[in-house]
Image: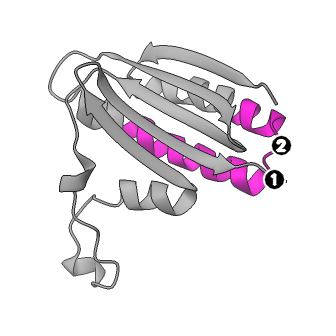
Amino acid sequence: MGECGVLRVAAQSTNLARVNEAVRQAAERVGLDARAVFQVEMALDEAFSNVVEHAYAGRASGDVEVSWFVEDGAFVVVLHDWGQAFDPTRVPEPDLTASLEDRNLGGLGLHFMRSLMDSVDYTFDQDGNWLRFTKTLPE
């Protein structure tokens, strides 16, 4: 269960498939079932797309480093970028009871990731943005 890896790529949507494939293979090797692997892929898609769209929006693309490893009985994925800081505490919880017409566009990304993963943590500091999400491994 010592599966770990790191991949640093330009934060461009064309690199998502490469990153997703590496993480998917690792998730399968550590024993996550097909449903859990799919959930990891969906969370990674959302997170990577957010980096491309928001962290580097309005300027030349930068890099994103994706790492994965097993820690404390969980498969962990970490995205690190050096783009614009993002404070998830400033994002209001989406009103899932509102009609589609009354909902704001966007704003579901964090909610979506949190519903798919067992934990989602976000930090930012002078070294960039760090998004970490985990999926518990089967016993």
Q: Which residue, as the protein is rendered here, is positioned at the far left? A: 58
Residue type indicated by callout 1: Pro
Return the disc, 2 or 1, that comes first in the chain's sequence. Answer: 2
Q: In which quarter of the image is the N terminus?
A: top right
Asked if residue 48 lies in the magenta stretch, the reply is yes
Q: Which mark is residue 31?
A: 2
- Residue 18: percent from the left, percent from the top? 59, 23
- Residue shown at 78%/52% (left/top)? 34
How many neighbours does mark 1 have within 10 angstroms: few (below 14), some (14-19), or many (20 or more)? few
Q: Name the residue under label 1.
A: 138
Q: Do the residues labelled 2 and 1 touch (CB within 8 Å)?
A: yes
Circle 2 or circle 1, nearest the eye: 1
In terms of depth relative to the viewer, which is nearer, 91 or 139? 139
Q: Quadrant of residue 85?
A: top left
- Residue 71: percent from the left, percent from the top? 66, 36
Q: In this view, does 100 lie to the left or right of 59?
A: right
Q: In this view, does 56 lie to the left or right of 4?
A: left
Please, is residue 34 above or below residue 10 in the view? Answer: below
- Residue 42: percent from the left, percent from the top? 56, 49
The region drawn magenta spans 24-49
Q: Which mark is residue 8?
A: none
Please, is residue 58 above or below residue 106 in the view? Answer: above
- Residue shown at 28%/18% (left/top)? 127
Residue type indicated by callout 2: Gly
How many neighbours does mark 2 have within 10 angstroms: few (below 14), some (14-19), or many (20 or more)? some
Please, is residue 123 above or below residue 138 in the view? Answer: above
Q: In this view, does 13 lie to the left or right of 94?
A: right
Q: Distance between the residues labelled 2 and 1?
A: 7 Å
The colour scheme used to paint the residues is one colour
* Label 2 secondary element: loop
